[in-house]
């Protein structure tokens, strides 16, 4: 009996898929192992959550999601994306961290495949050479420019910068320096710290010797806790130096484990779990239920990326060629758990609100509490 | 040396270097893979350059006993050079760029080989590791040239010999890598079966004794290290040319460490180890990663532990029968050749 039911069901689905024409394949290449695995996991969780919530069928087509692990190595990403395009014939590619997204970029152009960037924060990833790419993450410039403006207005005059020595760090520093000096401030010292396992003590001493009133820091989220601890240990907080940075350093995923030294750190970011909106409350609850940990700003790249794909498919009525999809995506606006966001029709980059937040203790846990909003911020490196 | 002895030695060497049946089978299979698996050319391309890279490490590890955790230094240099040559249109033709990149890697190999001469295995591990780290840091520090942490963008590779344009399906790339691999394999085979190759084995077995019978140990080590660096540089250049991209990752420690794993899987000191290891490693990785993108490393780890536990020797025992059979058949085809005992690990 059971078997008959199963056969009937199978026949039913086969018939219905026959009517529905082909599935839409979405291939996402993420780092799910290696040092950047936490990043990939957040994106994956965001994508899955969106599909669980909204079902796997859109515009009469079934979404077939294929996730591949590139371990954060760009030549892997490239080969995997190539296989997805050539063998699996995916209609849409999702890409992750900056080097991988850059490696995949030319492929999506060659294959005329829509490519949604879900993690990278480097400005140049979305460029005129690769017209089939859009971004649903953020750019470091968006955050660094805003925090510079805010700091200049709120009493900071002399800033020392401590930056991890890699491309996103350099970009954050460049935008911050530009915006802060334009607002009349002064950069007294720029210190580059090695990316891997740094001891911040000597760098902090140098920063202190420069006698700043504010320290702008950009290090990977995992290191921010250590940084804040050493910041306090060396008495920089008691010397009256404020600690500010882009939202990456108060990553909700890591914040609970960073320790009380982070209290009072002010950042400009795209998202906090505490963001006060019904959409976000629902998102956080569902995310925690499915995964058991907080969503962070990275997870939204996946969640909103999927939303963008769904809405674009609705708009094209199921047409999946890169041209139609990208045209549908351009200018799209929606309410994300992080707040209102849109895709800039000119640059294909994301436009979103940037929130100034301060680390505080809420119910015994550390949270980034948003207290000021800058609306519809574009990537400053593309404004020209 | 009496002429009779010379003749005997020459004969002996020639017999040793004779192609065995399984070797023909291996390369026929490689050729067949091109025609039979057109959908898998992308991963086969990766296997081909990884095999060449592993072959390069086998040359120094399996034949000269130099253990290295920094072979990615040469691989990475070759990779960046090939990408840069193409990007700035300095040398557009890929084959020429390939050779040039290999030669530059060889120069780096020669320069650093003197460091490797010093000390024991542990020192060598550290020194080679250090060289690779330095190379990575240099590439990281000159983002204007290398693109830094974002990788080198905008590389366009011209058609091979002006005729064959790389395609998105990887057909040309695979054919190209396979041909390069085969040619360099022939060269390596020639080298290891030459008197030079034999003297290397003597050095590996016992450097002191080798020196006392008149082999200049250091010169041999420098030569083979430089030679291997050339191979690694070519492998890196193949990667850059087939992906039109280079990133800091080419210098990474993981790349050197994975390479050792490949050799451990395939076995060292018989040239095919790296080739077979590369095939197994990549296919296993691809297969498991497709089943479980998050936890594939666990399963790979488990397989590696099992390989070490069971021991390649025991696996070799099983295959020993096959080898014996192959020897017998080969002998039947060439009855004039005298039977020569093949030391373990030297047959195909």
Image (cartoon, rainbow, N blue to C red):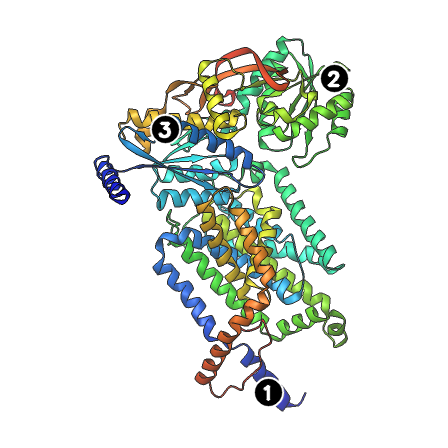
- Residue A83's place in the image compared with A28, above or below, is below
Could you say where residue A337 lies in the image, as x and y percent from the top left?
46, 19
Residue A237's disc is 2
Q: On the same chain: label 2 and label 1?
A: no
- Residue A285's place in the image compared with A104, above or below, is above
Label 1 marks a residue whose chain is B
Question: Looking at the image, which residue is at 57% across and 39% down?
Answer: B145
Q: Please name which of the two marks, 2 or 1, marks the residue nearer to the observer.
A: 2
Q: Nearer the viewer, residue A133 or A30?
A: A30
Q: Secondary structure at mark 1?
A: helix
Residue of label 1: B7
Q: Quadrant of the N terminus of chain A?
A: top left
> Dot 1: within a 10 Å radius of its alpha carbon, few (fewer than 14), some, or many (20 or more) residues?
few
Q: Is residue B283 left or right of residue A208?
A: left
Label 3 marks a residue whose chain is A
Could you say where residue A357 lies in the image, as x and y percent from the top left?
59, 15
Mark count? 3
- Residue B130's place in the image compared with B212, above or below, is above
Q: Is residue A193 left or right of residue B177?
A: right
Could you say where residue A35 lies in the image, as x and y percent from the top left?
58, 39
Question: Looking at the image, which residue is at 60% across and 20% down?
Answer: A176
Question: Looking at the image, which residue is at 61% across and 84% down?
Answer: B9
Residue of label 3: A309
Most extreme residue toward the front is A1
Q: Please name which of the two marks, 3 or 1, marks the residue nearer to the observer.
A: 3
């Amino acid at each position: 009996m059971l078997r008959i039911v199963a056969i009937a069901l199978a026949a039913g689905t086969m018939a219905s898929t026959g009517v529905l024409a082909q599935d839409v394949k979405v291939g996402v290449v993420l780092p799910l192992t290696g040092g950047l695995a936490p990043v990939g996991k957040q994106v994956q969780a965001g994508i899955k959550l969106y599909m669980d919530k909204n079902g796997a069928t859109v515009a009469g087509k079934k979404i077939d999601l294929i996730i591949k692990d590139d371990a954060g190595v760009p030549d892997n990403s490239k080969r995997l994306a190539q296989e997805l395009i050539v063998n699996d014939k995916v209609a849409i590619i999702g890409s992750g961290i900056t080097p991988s997204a850059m490696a995949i970029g030319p492929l999506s152009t060659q294959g005329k495949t829509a490519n949604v960037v879900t993690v990278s924060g480097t400005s140049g990833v979305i460029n005129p050479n690769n017209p089939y790419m859009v971004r649903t993450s953020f750019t470091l410039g968006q955050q660094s420019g805003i925090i510079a403006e805010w700091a200049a207005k709120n009493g900071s005059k002399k800033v020392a910068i401590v930056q991890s020595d890699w491309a996103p760090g350099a970009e954050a520093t460049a935008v911050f320096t530009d915006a802060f000096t334009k607002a009349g401030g002064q950069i007294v010292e720029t210190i580059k710290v090695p990316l891997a396992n740094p001891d911040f003590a000597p760098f902090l001493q140098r920063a202190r010797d420069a006698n700043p009133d504010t320290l702008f820091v950009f290090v990977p989220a995992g290191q921010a806790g250590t940084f804040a601890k050493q910041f306090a240990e060396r008495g920089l907080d008691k010397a009256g130096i404020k600690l500010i940075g882009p939202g990456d350093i108060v990553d909700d995923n890591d914040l609970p484990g960073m320790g009380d030294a982070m209290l009072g750190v002010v950042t400009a970011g795209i998202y906090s779990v505490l963001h006060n909106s019904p959409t976000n409350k629902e998102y956080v609850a569902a995310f925690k239920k499915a995964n058991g940990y907080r969503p962070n700003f990275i997870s939204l790249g996946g969640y909103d990326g999927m939303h963008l794909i769904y809405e674009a498919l609705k708009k094209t009525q199921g047409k999946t060629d890169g041209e139609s999809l990208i045209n549908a995506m351009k200018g799209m606006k929606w309410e994300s758990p992080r707040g209102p966001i849109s895709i800039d029709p000119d640059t294909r980059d994301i436009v979103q609100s940037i929130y100034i937040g301060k680390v505080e203790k809420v119910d015994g846990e550390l949270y980034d509490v948003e207290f000021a909003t800058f609306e519809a911020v574009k990537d400053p490196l593309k404004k020209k | 040396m009496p002429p009779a002895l010379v003749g005997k030695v020459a004969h002996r060497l020639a017999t040793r270097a004779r192609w065995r049946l399984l070797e023909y089978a291996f390369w026929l299979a490689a050729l067949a893979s091109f025609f039979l698996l057109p959908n898998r050319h992308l991963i086969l391309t990766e296997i081909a350059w990884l095999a060449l890279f592993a072959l390069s490490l086998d040359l120094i590890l399996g034949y000269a006993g130099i253990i290295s955790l920094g072979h990615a230094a040469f691989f990475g240099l070759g990779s960046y050079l090939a990408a840069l040559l193409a990007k700035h249109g300095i040398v557009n033709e890929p084959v020429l760029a390939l050779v040039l990149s290999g030669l530059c890697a060889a120069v780096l190999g020669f320069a650093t080989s003197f460091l490797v001469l010093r000390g024991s295995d542990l020192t060598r591990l550290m020194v080679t590791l250090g060289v690779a780290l330095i190379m990575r840091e240099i590439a990281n520090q000159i983002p204007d040239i290398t693109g830094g942490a974002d990788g080198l963008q905008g590389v366009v590779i011209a058609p091979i010999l002006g005729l064959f344009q790389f395609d998105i399906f990887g057909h040309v790339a695979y054919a190209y890598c396979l041909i390069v691999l085969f040619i360099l394999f022939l060269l390596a085979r020639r080298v290891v079966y030459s008197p030079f190759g034999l003297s290397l084995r003597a050095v590996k077995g016992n450097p002191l004794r080798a020196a006392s019978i008149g082999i200049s140990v250091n010169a041999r080590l420098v030569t083979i290290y430089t030679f291997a660096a050339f191979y690694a540089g070519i492998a890196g250049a193949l990667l850059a040319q087939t992906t039109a991209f280079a990133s800091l990752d080419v210098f990474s420690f993981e790349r050197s460490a994975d390479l050792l794993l490949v050799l451990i899987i395939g076995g060292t000191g018989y040239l095919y180890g790296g080739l077979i290891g590369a095939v197994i490693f990549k296919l296993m990785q691809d297969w498991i990663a497709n089943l479980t993108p998050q936890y594939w490393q666990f399963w790979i780890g488990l397989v590696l532990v099992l390989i070490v536990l069971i021991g390649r020797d025991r696996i070799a025992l099983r295959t020993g029968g096959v080898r014996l059979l192959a020897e017998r058949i080969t002998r039947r085809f060439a009855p004039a050749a005298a039977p020569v005992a093949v030391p373990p690990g030297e047959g195909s």
